[in-house]
Every structure is written in C-alpha cells, then in structure tokens.
C-alpha cells in the first residue's frame, strides 16, 4: 500500500523539492500524492531540500550527483586498483558495516561522560570534537582491513581510496556533534554503503537516554530487505493525515534563502500538524521516520554522509 507525501496545491515540488520562495501549504491547499510502499528521497543541488515520508524510503537520485557535488574540490587520491569484481553479498557487507558502526559508537560511549575538546569548523554552531576524529579513525580501520579497495567519503577525512571502485562508504562518525558536546540525546554514528551509486547497506547507532543512563539502539538495512532496529524489523507509521502527524526537520548553518524558506515551512507545518521537532541529527531523524515515531522529515543542505545511511531502503 502506498503512503502520502504532502505538497502544496500550487507546486508539486513542495516539500520534496523546495521552490526558491516559500509557497503556502495551508490545509485548504494540500494535495495528497500516493507513492509505492518505499521511502522516497531526493538529493538535489544546494538550493533544494530533502524530504522523507513514511513508511519506507525509495532512493530517487542520490548517488553520483550528490557525491560529486561534495567531492569536486577534494584532493583526488591516486588509484590503487579496484580488486572487487561483482557485487559483494549483502550479508557480508552488513557484517562489516555493523562492526564498523559499533566500533565508532564504542569510541563515543567511552568519551560521552568525559570533558570535550571542542573546535569550530565554520561558526559557533558547527562544532568538531576529538571524539569525531577518533570515531572516524576507528571506523576507517575496520573498513580498510576488510575492503582496502573501496572508496570512502568521511565527514572529517574527506575522500580516501580508489575513485574507480564500485563501492562508496559515506561515513558520519558523530552525527549531532553539538548535542554530543552538551550531553544532549540525539546523536549517532551513521554509515551508508553505495554500490554503483545506489544504496546497498546502512547502519546507524543512535545514542539514547542521557547523562548517567546512556544506551544505544542500532538501525540496519539492506536494499530490498527492509529496515531493522536491534534486530527486529521496523515499520513506519500508517498515519496519512497531516493533522495527525508529528514531523521533524533540521536547519543548516547558512542563514540564506533556503534557511528562510525552511522557517516558513516550519511555521506552516506547526499550524497544521501535531507538531514539528528539531532534534539536530539528520540520520536519527530519518531513522525515527522508519521506526514510525514521526511521520515525516525534511531538511535543506544535507551532505552525502548525513543521508546515505538514514535513507533506509525496503
């Protein structure tokens, strides 16, 4: 059975592809579009947004264009000669990706109650900690021991490996660094693997609880096999009415036209839904849609490592 994506009657591109200017999405102007029972996602140019609606997500046009936009200015490493021939069995990929994600999560768990060494990438809201770097190093160690010929795109380390490889690992070693820095729940390790530009497997280790009671839950998925949380298959919400929905969004660091448009969407969705939450971790937001505890999510300016794992295919 299909699910619903809510868009403005004046533009079929809201909110899965945002127009440059805010467009009214009042309840009187809503149209309902049915999609197959897979999660829908679009990754567009920096002027555009990303939207997921329950139940599970179908990957539309992420892959090479999205990645190319992020790595075009990166140093191009010399080729080492791709050794992989043909697709690797999903069970084998899942085993390695889960080990890698849990290894990164262990680094974070050991640091979560310790003082932070914080630096800034761009502004006061774009933080990086030593834990981000240590988690990524631990993850890279696992990946490179198992698949030394695969290409890797990490949030902290950039592009590493063989650019001719059919496999691309997108790694966010600590998605939600600001939350982590303040011991505020909603941060995660997020890893997604693409094969020839399409999502193959994913793992997200979400930190839940809070100071003195931290715990984790692990989301995994393989293309065509659904999504799981701690080994149990999960299903998105069956709610298809916006007035009965809880939504989630995020705001980027740049206060530009896209940011202003998102503020307008935030206002209007708040008026016509049960509420809109802003948790501060894109991968966690998308996993919460897959888990069925929120009905929809949208955000601008996502990077490949923000969404490669959160887009959980069925």
Image: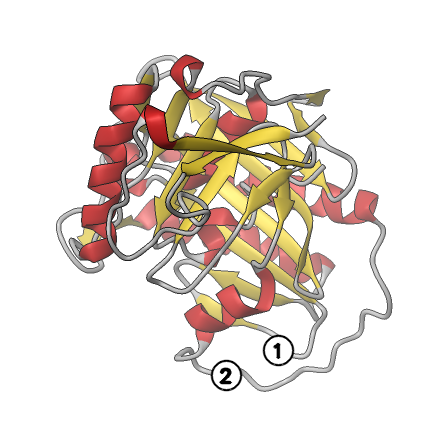
Q: Position of residue 40 (x, y in %)?
A: 58, 42
- Of residues 223 and 298, the one nearer the viewer is 298
149, 176: nearer the viewer: 176
Residue 308 percent coordinates (x, y):
55, 50
Q: Which residue is mark 1?
A: 163
Say which quarter of the image contains residue 196.
bottom right
Q: Secondary structure at mark 2?
A: loop
The location of residue 282, given as percent across then percent down, is 41, 40
Position of 16 with respect to 118 (left or right) is right
Residue position for label 2: 76
Residue at the spot 86% in from the left edge and 66% down from the top edge? 86
Instruction: Residue at 44%, 67% (x, y): give it.
Output: 158
Are circles 1 and 2 on residues that touch, CB within 8 Å?
Answer: yes
Q: Is residue 162 left or right of residue 81?
A: left
Crowd tier of the residue under label 1, counting other residues whose Cα lies within 10 Å: few below 14, some 14–19, many 20 or above: many
Tell me: residue 140, above or below residue 38.
below
Disc on res. 45: none
Residue at image position (34%, 25%) is 28
């Amino acid at each position: 059975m299909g699910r619903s994506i809510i868009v403005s009657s004046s533009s079929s591109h809201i909110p899965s592809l945002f127009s440059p200017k805010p467009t009214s999405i009042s309840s009187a102007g809503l149209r309902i579009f049915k999609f197959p029972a897979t999660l829908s996602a679009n990754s567009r140019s920096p002027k555009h947004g990303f939207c997921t609606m329950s139940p599970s997500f179908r990957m539309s046009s992420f892959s090479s264009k999205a990645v190319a936009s992020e790595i075009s200015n990166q140093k191009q490493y010399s080729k080492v000669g791709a050794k992989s021939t043909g697709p690797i069995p999903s069970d084998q990929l899942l085993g390695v990706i889960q080990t890698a994600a849990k290894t990164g999560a262990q680094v974070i768990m050991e640091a979560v109650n310790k003082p932070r060494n914080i630096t800034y990438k761009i502004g006061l809201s774009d933080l990086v900690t030593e834990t981000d770097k240590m988690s990524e190093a631990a993850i890279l160690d696992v990946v490179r021991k198992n698949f030394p010929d695969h290409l890797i795109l990490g949030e902290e380390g950039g592009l590493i490996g063989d650019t001719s490889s059919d496999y691309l690992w997108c790694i966010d070693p600590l998605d939600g660094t600001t939350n982590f820095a303040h011991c505020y729940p909603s941060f995660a390790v997020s890893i997604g693997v693409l094969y020839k530009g399409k999502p193959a497997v994913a793992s997200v280790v979400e930190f839940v609880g809070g100071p003195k009671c931290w715990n984790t839950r692990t989301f995994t998925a393989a293309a065509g096999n659904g999504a799981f949380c701690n080994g149990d298959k999960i299903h998105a919400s069956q709610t298809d009415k916006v007035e009965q929905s809880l939504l989630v969004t995020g705001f980027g660091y740049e206060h530009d036209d896209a940011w202003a448009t998102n503020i307008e969407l935030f206002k209007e969705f708040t008026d016509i839904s049960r509420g809109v939450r802003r948790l501060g971790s894109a991968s966690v937001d998308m996993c919460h849609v897959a888990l069925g505890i929120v009905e929809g999510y949208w955000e601008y300016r996502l990077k490949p490592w923000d969404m490669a794992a959160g887009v959980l295919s069925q």
